Image (cartoon, rainbow, N blue to C red):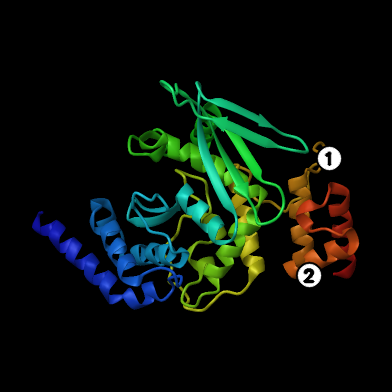
Amino acid sequence: MSTELATKVSHTKGLIEKRKTQLLEVLPKHIEPDRMLRVFQNAITRNKKLLECTDLSILTTLATCGAFGLEPNTPLGQCHIIPYNDQATFQMGYQGLIELARRAGTTIRVGTVHENDLFEMECGTEPKVIHKPCIKGERGKVLGYYAIAHPPTGMPLFEYMTKEECIAHGKKYSKAFNKPDSPWQTAPDSMCLKTVVIRVCKYAPKSILAEWASVETRSGVDLQTIAPASALVDDDGAIIETVASEPTGEPVNDLDAIADKFEDAEHIADGEPPSLEPPTQERKMSHFDLMQTLKAARRESGKTLKELEQISRDNFGTVVANLNPEQIETMIDILNNNA
């Protein structure tokens, strides 16, 4: 190890040690502090490019990893700290998404379908997936990927994408897709699995939202500051990409802000930027447009998400997520009349 590199390693270890109290106080109760501190040090000091990143961006990403209780840059693949120029950035792995959902009561299983496997799926009122991997001989080339979510209540949800669809997704939304060190090149199966996990989570976002809320309400970290909605992108497998900014040290209890951030992340991941502008006359208002208009109306009326859900139950006997377009329009009218 060169003298320069040894100096950087020593500096980074000292930095983490100096700020370990702040980094460890946000950990979930089930995480062992000493182990996580070692993981933090290894994640940074074993990557020369990360050693070139600013101290503030390193501390910010480590605080985010700690708040979620996910180990960065390990074979578990829960999350990653990636250097972009001189900024260390946090990126969620698909295993991290699965872990957050598990803590919130939703089990997610994933699978890779090969050409010699038996694979059947049915959509409609009774959706189901049958996958019997080939156990005699070669399984053949990969055809596609799927994720199945089992929420605490209701029927299982699943999402399937062909390999070509996943690769096309990566090419469209990852600016570094063709770089030799891009995870789309070094670990394409993991990136494809993450893509289907993201999609199935969008059908049942409340599971991860609940865990996200528990992260934000622990004192010592403000993820609204650490990871603003503008940084929530699906790029190189990222769900969250942190920016360098000091944590406020105050707990966040605004579930509306958390929900807005999650909702925006869903549509950014699909390449559809969040917009509150009404659709043009040439384009019929889509479900997404209606939900965005409903969100804007709720903000204007001053109602909380909890109050919005109660209005939905009082008028339609179900939650907002289950409303049809006509019911959403009625909800918008109710909020506008009460504004």
Which residue does the image show at 42% across and 53% down from the upper left? 78
Quadrant containing the C terminus in the rendered view: bottom right
User: For this view, does 23 lie left or right of residue 331?
Assistant: left
At label 1, the amino acid type is Gln
Quadrant containing the N terminus in the rendered view: bottom left
Front tag of 2 and 1:
2
Q: Secondary structure at mark 2?
A: helix
Calculate the distance from the C-alpha at mark 2 to the C-alpha at mark 1. 32 Å
Which residue does the image show at 51% across and 52% down from the upper left? 98
Q: Secondary structure at mark 1?
A: loop
User: For this view, does 299 lie left or right of residue 146?
Assistant: right
**Residue 244 rendering spot, x and y as whole percentages:** 41, 63
At label 2, the amino acid type is Glu
- In the foreground, 193 or 339: 193
Disc 1: which residue: 281
**Residue 302 rendering spot, x and y as whole percentages:** 77, 71
Q: Local crowd at mark 2 within 10 Å, few (<14), some, or many (≥20)?
A: few
- Residue 175 in view in this figure: no
Residue that extends furthest to the front in the rendered view of this protein:
136
User: For this view, does 148 lie left or right of residue 244?
Assistant: right
Q: How many marks?
A: 2
Q: Quadrant of residue 3?
A: bottom left
Q: Local crowd at mark 1 within 10 Å, few (<14), some, or many (≥20)?
A: few
**Residue 158 rendering spot, x and y as whole percentages:** 63, 41
- In the foreground, 19 or 78: 78
Disc 2: which residue: 307
